[in-house]
Image (tube, rainbow, N blue to C red):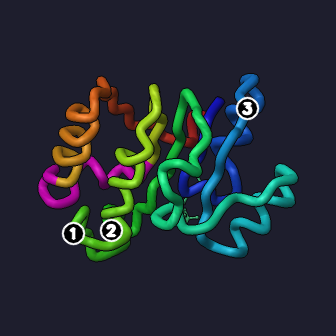
Amino acid sequence: RYAELFAGVGGFRLALDGLGGRCVFASEIDPCAAATYERNFGDAPLGDITEVPDEDLPAHDLLTAGFPCQSFSRSGEQRGLGDARGDLFFEIVRVAPAALLLENVPNLLRVDNGHALHIIVHALTRAGYHCRLKKKNTRSF
Ligand SMILES: C[S@@+](CC[C@H](N)C(=O)[O-])C[C@H]1O[C@@H](n2cnc3c(N)ncnc32)[C@H](O)[C@@H]1O
């Protein structure tokens, strides 16, 4: 059983359903992405995750999140976690099931001289997770 935050059009869902996973919750704020998601999978994600109370989240074993990358990306102002969009990372820690599968841009490793990544890993470690970081080139898949 998995939940996906920042679901977009459902990239994680496509992969996990293929591996036998069952999606029990999805959240996506953008109406066009949500409509595409619904067309792809037959159910509509809930909207803004910051407005979903803890008790509305069904039990799940794995949480996936391609959390918003604008403030980490080299294409933006690189304000890291000091930006309302970067700050959405903490929604992941709030939900916090047994395991997390997170994805972002490679510049997350460097933005704010590595400070943003340090805070993220620290927050996850404090929440009881062991973190493994991997940099992947999608050309290989
Ligand atoms: C990097 S994209 C995720 C892409 C996704 N992994 C996919 O396969 O399409 C981040 C997504 O987070 C969504 N988002 C941003 N703020 C949100 C919020 N407060 N609640 C829910 N979704 C949000 C954006 O609309 C965007 O689609």
Q: Is residue 71 above or below residue 23?
A: below
Q: Nearer the viewer, mark 3 or mark 2?
A: 3
Q: 74 and 55: which one is in front?
A: 55
Q: Looking at the image, is mark 3 or mark 2 earlier in the sequence?
A: 3
Q: 23 and 140: which one is in front?
A: 23
Q: Quadrant of ligand 1?
A: bottom right
Q: Which mark, by number, is residue 82?
A: 1
Question: Per the image, is 17 magenta?
Answer: no
Give neighbour class at mark 3: few <14, some 14-19, many 20+ (Cα, 10 Å). some
Most extreme residue toward the front is 55
Location of the C terminus by quadrant is top right
Q: Looking at the image, is mark 3 or mark 1 earlier in the sequence?
A: 3
Image position, residue 64 (x, y; %)? 53, 41
Q: Is residue 6 above or below residue 85?
A: above
- Tell me the amino acid under the disc marked 1: Gly
Q: What residue appears at the point 27 percent right and 34 percent down from the top-left corner?
A: 127
Numbered range of the magenta stretch: 104-115
The reply to whether discs 1 and 2 touch (Cβ–Cβ < 8 Å) is: yes
Q: Which mark, by number, is residue 22?
A: 3
Magenta residues, dominant SS class = helix
Marks 1/2: CA–CA distance: 8 Å
Q: Secondary structure at mark 3?
A: loop
Marks 3/1: CA–CA distance: 34 Å
